[in-house]
Image: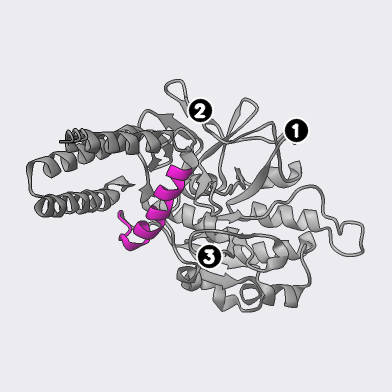
Amino acid sequence: MRAGRRPRRRLPLGVVGLAAVGLSAGLWCLSPSIVREAMRERTLDLLLPMLPLPGAAGPDVMVVDIDRASLARFGPWPWPRAQLARVISAIAAAKPRAVGLDILLAGRDRFAGAAGPDGDAMLREALASVPAVLGTALEDGAAGDDLPTTPILGKAPVRLPDIWRAQGVVGPDPALADAAQGLGALVEAADADGPIRRVPLLVLTTDTLRPGLAVEIVRVAQGAGELLIEPDGLHIGDVRVPLPPEATLRLIPRPPATWAAHTVSAVRLTDDPRARAALAGTVVLLGGSAPELGGLRVTPESPVTPSVLIQATAVDALLRGAVAYRPGWLHGAEIGCAALLGLLCVLVALRLRPALGAVLALVMCAGWAGIAVAAVPECLMAR
């Protein structure tokens, strides 16, 4: 008679479950941060537009668009500074609170040698007639221009380890810079997965902190003299915004079509004085949707979003006090809660019948997802 085979030892179900939870947690923690961030940001791209914007609506934000019709009427880009001055003068005639240019006016007028009016002189006069903010660009590998910056005061040492840095900055001619009331960084870096979701609140050039364009426009619109960094965030006049380690503002997606009612074509503004009434008392951004201006960007809403709309969205968010903010402690809490959820699912599988255990595990996972979605509005800071 043949001896029977010894039964194979099987690992207890609980050990297998715990091993699965531990392996999943380990893989998540060890996976590249780019993967984790991309998954999180794409989920927020879907959730954030569904939420009503909290906070009281600030002053209207309007966009003056250098579109194809404007280029057809006034000529190809870049325009002579004299033509740009005429557009800004038309904006100034409407008495807006502030005007920000999503345009880099580096160097002198390239048409200065041609016969005609002094474009730089006309532009200086136009900029001096309205509270204006000009854009600057970060320069790597060179010191760049010696440009002034808004005073940024702090009550304690500032730690911004992930702030956007550069060796220097490139901006408008000093004469134009002096005519404006502020200079802001034109930075719109894409995330690792492609779209632009953030604009800088602050940037660092060598050892100098400088404001982003949206921050500077809000400061000038409020008539504030400086920026203040406190433990609770960045104070821009009466506006307070949390200051994450990278000193950026996470935008709440808004489809470009939502800006249609807040956009005026530059050609219509100059040809029809009645169109200027819509700009009275507002914050105006001047930029272009025409491809020739090179300002089209990939965002979660559209692969051809004009950069001026990105900056306008940031200005509107700051004035409303409706800012998407991710607290620093949330990263560890997410991992801990996910591990706890896995352990609970293992215990349920051990204690209950398979069918009932599976149902309860699915319910807990759905509850986790629901809690995460419900917590998203709490990350919107209302001033």
Image point 49% across, 44% down: which residue? 219
- Answer left or right for 168 relative to 149: right
Q: Earlier in the sequence, mark 1 or mark 2?
A: 1
Between the C-alphas of marks 3 and 2, the distance is: 31 Å
Which residue was labeled with disc 3? 302
Q: Which mark is residue 141?
A: 1
Which amino acid type is shown beneath numbered disc 3?
A: Ser
Look at the image and tell me in which quarter the N terminus lies.
Answer: top left
Q: Residues within 10 Å of mark 2 (few under 14, many from 20)?
A: few
For numbered disc 2, what is the local secondary structure? loop
For numbered disc 1, what is the local secondary structure? loop
Nearer to the camera, 187 or 5: 5
Image point 76% across, 48% down: which residue? 106
Image point 49% across, 51% down: which residue? 197
Residue 334: give x, y in percent of width and height. 30, 38
Nearer to the camera, 219 or 304: 304
Q: Which mark is residue 18?
A: none
Q: Is residue 288 visible?
A: yes
Q: Which mark is residue 161?
A: 2
- Considering every residue shown, the one lying at the far left of the view is 352
- Answer left or right for 306 relative to 1: right
Q: Residues within 10 Å of mark 1 (few under 14, many from 20)?
A: few
- The quadrant in which residue 94 appears is bottom right
Q: Is residue 92 visible?
A: no
Residue 354 part of the magenta segment: no
- Answer left or right for 301 relative to 185: left
Q: Earlier in the sequence, mark 1 or mark 3?
A: 1
Between the C-alphas of marks 1 and 2, the distance is: 20 Å
Which residues are drawn in magenta?
35-54
